[in-house]
Amino acid sequence: MNIAIIGNNYFGPILTKQLSEYDTVNSYIFYDTNSKIIDKIKFILNIFKIDVVYSLSAFYCTSNAISKEELFKDIYISADIVVGDNVFIGSHTVVLPGSIIENNVVVSANSVVKGTLKSGYLYGGTPVVQLRKIS
């Protein structure tokens, strides 16, 4: 798979290098889409060769970061996040533990995802709501 990492010019190259060393099966490419016009153009030209786009300004949370052993052990949540094919997650979006995003879904920027997002829809808001069908 070809995985594009877009966004921050400081953390992007570091994350791309670490992922490439850890995962030798997939191909990771960093595009500094925040400040370099040439990288924006390269990203657009290669969009049909890219299988997954990971934005550094999105946040995927697989636990609520409260230790199980502390006072809040009754509300501790830890669960996988499932993201389908052909999914676009806007910047500054938070995806909470246990969320499932089916195929062909668009999530607008600044959203909070919790639960299951059904295939073929545009979602947005805090928490996300189904906005309209994608044609």
Image (cartoon, rainbow, N blue to C red):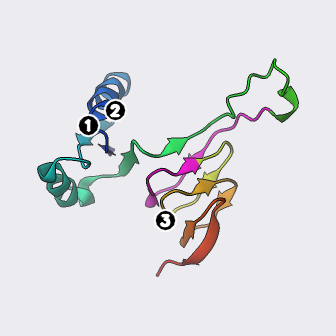
In the current view of this chain or complex, which residue is farthest to the top?
69
Magenta span: 76-94
The circle on residue 9 is 1
Q: Distance of mark 3 from mark 1, alpha carbons?
A: 25 Å
Three-letter amino acid code at the position of disc 1: Asn
The circle on residue 106 is 3
Indicate the position of residue 122 as horizontal and vertical percent values.
53, 71
**Measuring 83% from the left and 28% from the top, which residue is drawn there?**
72
Tell me the SS state at disc 1. loop
Indicate the position of residue 39 as horizontal and vertical percent values.
17, 49
The circle on residue 25 is 2
The numbered mark, 1 or 2, whose residue comes first in the sequence reads 1
Three-letter amino acid code at the position of disc 3: Val
Q: Quadrant of the N terminus?
A: top left
Few, some or many C-alpha atoms within 10 Å of disc 2 (few <14, some 14-19, many ≥20)? few
Q: Quick one: 9 or 87, which is closer to the camera?
A: 9
Instruction: State which mark lies toward you, 1 or 2.
Output: 1
**Measuring 24% from the left and 49% from the top, which residue is drawn there?**
33
Tell me: residue 64, above or below residue 31.
above
Magenta: main secondary structure equals loop
Magenta includes 16? no
